[in-house]
Amino acid sequence: MKPRLIRKDVYWLGAVDWNRRLFDCLIPLPDGTSYNAYLVRGSQGTALLDAVDPSMTSILMRQLAEVERIDYLVSQHAEQDHSGAIPAVLNRYPEAVLVCTPKAKPMLLEHLDVPPERIKTVEDGETISLGDKTLRFVHTPWVHWPETMCTHLPEDRILFSCDFFGSHLATTDLCAGGEPYVCEAAKRYYAEIMMPFRKIIQSNMKKVRACDFDLLAPSHGPIYDNPECILSAYDDWSSDRVSNLVVLPYISMHGSTEIMVDCLVAALAERGVKVQKFELSGADIGKLAMALVDAATIVIGTPTVHVGAHPSVYAATHLVNALRPKLKYAAIIGSYGWGTKAVEQLSGLIPNLKVEVLGTVLCKGLPREDTLAAIEALADTIRAKHALIEGTPS
Ligand code: FEO
């Protein structure tokens, strides 16, 4: 794709990666992604904001073919999907200064082949003048690594945000407009990448909202030409508000745990509690992460394998702990053959979750009447806890 004009003398560059299906060998990308870079031409200088994934370097270099000079290459984030092409850009433009936060400098030197003398670090609030345009740097740590920053272009009322507010979405749409599919993709992205830093995001949101802009240009996915839509979504997702929702990841090897899970789903539904059930041998973990964005409760369903939880449940529980969702309540259910330490094992995997444990229901072999009664009682407990949540039907 050729450079696309977004404001006078400001261009989108970058690569749309339609075929990528996995990020970090972990995160599913059902809709691909993009690596956006931006060219800002001032009356006295030109800046390139971010580069692209190393696999897409040739695309960026072709887009720069007619750009004779770059004075500043701004690295807003050192992760390779935005920095991988930096060495190629620096080689092509020997006058270019690589601009980054002080925390980013050692990271760029560790991850890339970059001469240290080419790097200029900028403090929070510092500016670089390009003549009739100004780059103002806003440090926004932990979106997504500790060194990340945004760049404000006040004359054109644009905020460039790199990973912050991004979406893994391959599309020919330059701008999001009011498209619901963009918000859906942004929520998936928030869940998978931003959610662990929810508290820091709340403080970064204040810094972002203090900037005057009407275009929000991330380095993944479309540009927001109605930024309030994604800003209010982030306010909501990162808030302490939870919804009347139970997330239920589980595995069942021989059907007994599934009977318990189905009993609980039905009992909760009868009580007006919404449930999202994820059978982990085939679940999209991105959807599981999305459900965790505002769920009040997690119930983990596991059979026992060699005394412990099923390995797929173990891995999913570890992931939930790493994502640090704002869950308030948790429970574990499942069936075992002759002995189990699954509850002790899973409980030890979730130190990051500040949850009240509502109980466990375990049974040996097939669930009988007493087990199903215990499941109904667990549903009563969950319903009573959720009754305290705003918006739950009484
Ligand atoms: Fe898009 Fe944290 O890299």
Image: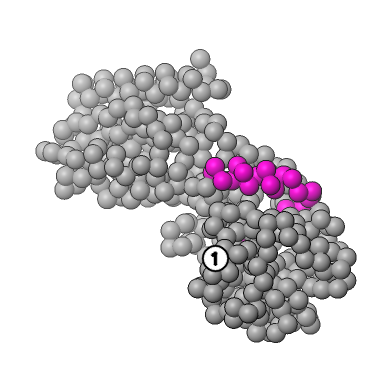
Q: Secondary structure at mark 1?
A: loop
Q: In the displayed structure, would residue 340 be above or below residue 76?
A: above
Image-quadrant location for residue 77: bottom right
Image-quadrant location for residue 88: bottom right
Name the residue located 73 percent from the left edge and 73 percent from the top edge.
72
The answer to whether residue 219 shows anywhere in this view is no
Q: Is residue 207 magenta?
A: yes
Nearest the camera: 7 or 140? 140
Badge 1 is on which residue?
79
Nearest the camera: 63 or 218? 218
Q: Is residue 286 left or right of residue 224?
A: left
Name the residue located 76 percent from the left edge and 76 percent from the top edge.
71
Pick the quarter of the image with the N terminus. Answer: bottom right
Q: Give the x, y percent position of residue 90.
A: 66, 80
Q: Give the x, y percent position of residue 204.
A: 63, 47
Asked if the beta carbon under badge 1 is closer than 8 A to the nearest atom of ligand 1, the reply is yes
Q: Give the x, y percent position of residue 232.
A: 67, 39
Name the residue located 54 percent from the left edge and 65 percent from the top edge.
79
Looking at the rendering, the stretch of residues picked out in magenta corresponds to: 198-221
- Most extreme residue toward the top, as rendered? 394
Q: Is residue 255 left or right of residue 16?
A: left
Q: Amino acid at mark 1?
A: Glu
